[in-house]
Amino acid sequence: MILYPAIDLKDGNAVRLLRGEMDQATIFNTDPAAQAETFQAQGFEWLHLVDLNGAFAGSPVNGAAVESILKRVKLPTQLGGGIRDLDTIGFWLERGLTRVILGTVAVKNPTLVKEACKAFPGHVAVGIDARDGYVAVEGWAETSSLKALDLALKFEDCGVAAIIYTDIDRDGALGGVNVEATADLASHLTTPVIASGGVSSLADLRALKEVEHTGINGVISGRALYDGRIDPAAALAVLRGE
């Protein structure tokens, strides 16, 4: 199981939000590329980036920070936030991004996701952010009437590399990951699922590792890595089964 350290970008800084609220941002590093280098030195195998401003704007905003990270770090990297057309996907993949994450557009234009998977096979993930089981869009500002599983099932046969499932009510709150909901979603899919939201301890990682067989192959952690609640070496050992 892969542990993805998260770098959430707001106004050029690496931050963490509390439950997705833009006015509840804590700045952890004013140099996101330096933060990425730290994660690389700690032994992580992937990076997870989110352009928070871009998610609200509907187009990339923190592009300079993303490009700086891609230039200074050799890790495979995935990015979400404001990516809503094929041109933007192509732009980022050409600059060295490994995987794009489509969120709002997956709800509003699922056909685009399928087109993207055909044009860029293996490089497209879908981000499903849920509040009480229902999908939220537009930087989590709106909650739709669509259930998370129903959305995920739409992309079962089109080659999505992964489904990134975030429980918004737990995100950034260190309240523990929603293992049950994540495992339930994964068990209904053939697409691999990456868990996100609320990871606060090694116990959370062990709990996810125990249900890895349902189809969970990764987990994203942000605040707990920044504030020292999770030791990188210990976390990586847990997910390797050591």
Image (cartoon, grey):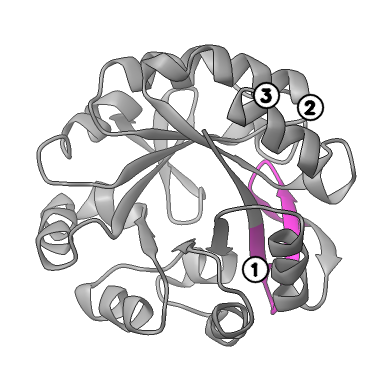
Which of discs 2 and 1 lies nearer the camera? The answer is 2
> Which residue does the numbered mark 1 point to in the structure image?
9
**Is residue 9 highlighted in magenta?**
yes
Q: Is 82 drawn above or below residue 200 in the view shown?
A: below
Q: Position of residue 225 (x, y in %)?
A: 79, 46
Which of discs 3 and 1 lies nearer the camera? The answer is 3
Q: Position of residue 54 (x, y in %)?
A: 50, 71
Left/right placement of residue 222 relative to residue 225 reads: left
Give the residue drawn at x 83%, y 64%: 27
Mark 2–mark 3 distance (CA, rounded to whole Å): 17 Å
Which of the marked residues, 3 or 1, is nearer the chain's N terminus?
1
Which of discs 2 and 3 lies nearer the camera? The answer is 3
- Residue 224 is at least partly visible in this image: no
- Secondary structure under the numbered disc 3 in the rendered image: loop
Which of the marked residues, 2 or 3, is nearer the chain's N terminus?
2
* Viewport quadrant of the C terminus: top right
Instruction: Report the magenta stretch's main SS.
Output: strand
Mark 2–mark 1 distance (CA, rounded to whole Å): 23 Å
Which of the marked residues, 2 or 1, is nearer the chain's N terminus?
1
